[in-house]
Amino acid sequence: MTQPIDCPLLTPFDGSFDLSSVPTSPPSDAPGKKECKELLAKEVEKLDDLQRVLYAKDHHSILCVFQAMDAAGKDSTIRAVFKGVNPAGFQVHSFKRPSTKELDHDFLWRSAKALPERGRIGVFNRSYYEEVLVVKVHPGILDSQKLPDRLGLDELFQNRYESIRDHEKHLARNGVVILKFWLNVSRDEQARRFLSRLDDPRKNWKFEPGDVKERGYWDKYMDAYEGAIQETSREHAPWYAVPADDKSYMRWQVARVLRKTLEQLDLAYPEVDPAEREQFDGFHKQLSAELE
Ligand code: ATP
Ligand code: MG
């Protein structure tokens, strides 16, 4: 199993995560925007190479979970970090409000179906974590979930954390390398980004009045994020709290954590069986002769 990348973004595994202690801006000694872009480009190149071997080896899959408040930059980070990878070995799944069919199953069902196959990288743009985030902020959503028992909210969410921990442990044991990124944008920066969606005609389409309403629940969301990270950050499924107010720094950090994790897998192209290799000479001669 891979080890979490030891960096300031990594959250603790003992339930002591304190959301007020994590910054939304890069540290003062962080590289500037231009340098972050150059560093990201290097990471993107390395990710391309690593993905090729991951695909050839075909033993592990990589699951990157992205959670964040609106306008934190999930979409653009996914686009920037994965722009070099081969689309054939890569898949993104965006989780919206569950459909009627999805509500007819347990809350992990729809994500289990969307998991990346061996050799592939999968991204969850939102995920089953919504079940302990938006649902915790708006418990009225539970009324549509057809749950068999009416549990108290505390017990219900503790049960969900437990289900998520068990699920992730099961996946990790079976070759899924799980990385979870919380893109931590500040409330002020979110307001600035909403304003630019209102001001810039090319961004108008991104503006959702509902997002402004949701922003009113900021503190409740932060409590829910803190609880989810406390309860589910584990060595085999770590949460990285990434400062999101500066997009260039955030994208570089996400790419760096992913690249370093992939490197730990010690990936190598599969070796051909010696008996099969012996036949290579014959094929070589035959094909060369055809070209003469
Ligand atoms: P963007 O706005 O950039 O397109 P998004 O991820 O915000 O991306 P939306 O369609 O705006 O996509 O929002 C999806 C909504 O679905 C979010 O408000 C999210 O909280 C909600 N959602 C996702 N999963 C669940 C769930 N299991 N239960 C209830 N709501 C959910
Ligand atoms: Mg949205």
Image (tube, grey):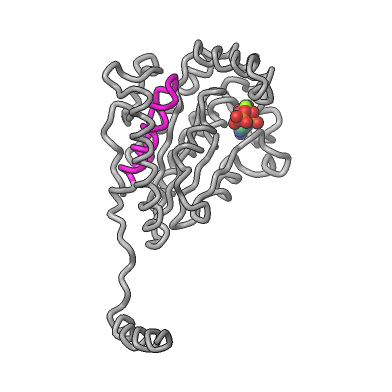
Taking the spot 40% from the left edge, 50% from the top edge, the residue there is: 48
Taking the spot 31% from the left edge, 85% from the top edge, the residue there is: 281
- Quarter of the image holding residue 36? top left
User: Is residue 191 visible to the viewer in this orientation of the structure?
Assistant: yes
Q: In this rendering, is residue 140 above or below 259?
A: above
Q: In this rendering, is residue 1 above or below 65?
A: below
* Residue 288 placement (x, y as % from top left): 37, 84
Q: In this rendering, is residue 268 above or below 282?
A: above
Location of the C terminus by quadrant is bottom left
* Residue 276 placement (x, y as % from top left): 33, 82
Taking the spot 33% from the left edge, 86% from the top edge, the residue there is: 279
Is 67 in front, or is 206? 206
First to last magenta residue range: 236-261
Is 123 in front, or is 140? 123
- The answer to whether residue 250 is magenta is yes
Looking at the image, in which quadrant does ligand 1 appear?
A: top right
Is 34 in front, or is 112? 34
